[in-house]
Image: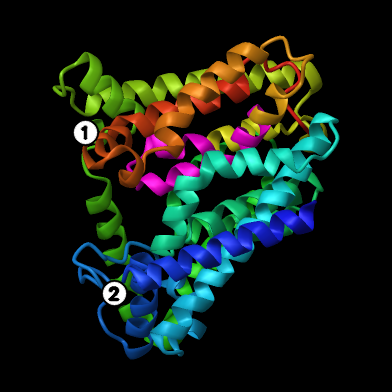
Amino acid sequence: MKKGFAIAVTLLCLGYLALEWYNGRAQMADFRVYYDAANALLSGKTLYGKAFGVSSGFYKYSPFACIPFIPLALLPYAIASVLYYLLITATIVFFSLRLADYVCQKLGTASSIVLPIMGGLFMIDHLERELHLGNINLFLLVLLFEAYRALQSKQSAKGGIVYGLVLLFKPHFLLLLPYLLWKRQFKATWITLACVTIGILLPSIGLGWSKNMQLIHQWATAMGDHNGALQLSPNTVYGLINRIFLNSKAGTWLILMILGLVSLAFGAFILRNDARSGQRWSDEIRFTEFFLLVGMVPNLVHTDTEHFMWVWPLLMLAIQTARSNQDQWRKTRIALLTLAFIPFAVNSPDLVGTRARLVLDEGGLGIANLLILAAALIGNKHNTPG
């Protein structure tokens, strides 16, 4: 069954690539940014404040994040983009099956091909955008999953290094750092910080100290420009509350207040879990705790719509739990997932039209993400693998 799933998904992705080429849409705009930025780094040209490929193609990541793309940047773009597309395809197949097996194992249920199929259908719009744009969001999620697995297995060094690599691409995931400290993952935390420091300084070897420091400053500026006024970002919790209840009149105070409330709520959640089984990582780390923080990122910071794929682990958990007839919250969980499915998976202009897609993308996705998180957390007695 797994082999058939892998073949079917691969053929679907290859068919989509053929359609992209036939319709002249195979630009992979985000990959073009990484590709051109890697070439700019090699030639000592400007990384930040310059559009690569398309008018909105600004590079927003650390100088280190260019380095993994250098081997592809040495190839002609047509070849490099196809190779990158195939890498995303292989990762979709691999992670779908790996995540499904892990969730089934931790919930004590038999593995079934139904789970990766249902999860894939739910994630189809985001995976399609990942293939179309050629972004790195799926790879970051896989790295976070492997960091979690490593920490679960008491491999602090591996977990810290992998988490550090993620931070060099997306500092948004710094919100996991206080959680690691709370769980007394001190070794992993120091290794993470060391990995980030080395990654920040590494380009100095080829660029020189002053040039690299200049790039670091430009990176910080680019990140600040990208985030802007969070209370106006439509899919964040602040943006949703501001638009629905405050008629878009709130200021920075709303962000601070909600961040405080979210922090208190999450703190109460993990304190409750700690009271049940202690703080030891190997015994107490909760899949739901770790990936709740990961899945909440698009609701707490300004991100692109495809970043909502980071809720995938908790989505799979919610789906598999809802499949059990013994789940007393089954009907509620199914209702929440059904409501979330519409804006989360059907927000394609080819299906609902451009106007409806904008409504679903700007606010609908944020609400859908919260519904998925609620579906995973509700009745959290046994939805805490670990």
Q: Which residue in the protein does label 2 denote?
A: 47
- Magenta segment's dominant SS is helix
Residue 324 horizontal/vertical position (percent): 76, 21
Q: Which corner quadrant of the image does residue 271 belong to?
A: top right
| Disc assigned to residue 232 | 1
Q: Nearer the viewer, residue 239 or 165?
A: 239
Residue 175 horizontal/vertical position (percent): 49, 40
The quarter of the image holding the C terminus is top right
Residue at 59% x, 19% y is 334
Q: Is residue 80 in view? A: yes
The range drawn in magenta is 294-318
Q: Which corner quadrant of the image does residue 261 belong to?
A: top left
Residue at 36% x, 84% y is 39
Q: Residues within 10 Å of mark 1 (few under 14, many from 20)?
A: many
Q: Is residue 173 in view? A: no
Q: Nearer the viewer, residue 209 or 305?
A: 305
134 lies above or below 335: below
Secondary structure beneath label 2: loop
Residue 118 horizontal/vertical position (percent): 63, 38
Q: Is residue 368 magenta?
A: no
Secondary structure beneath label 1: helix
Q: Give the foreground label among 1 and 2.
A: 1
Q: Residues within 10 Å of mark 2 (few under 14, many from 20)?
A: many
Q: Earlier in the sequence, mark 1 or mark 2?
A: 2
Residue 311 horizontal/vertical position (percent): 54, 38
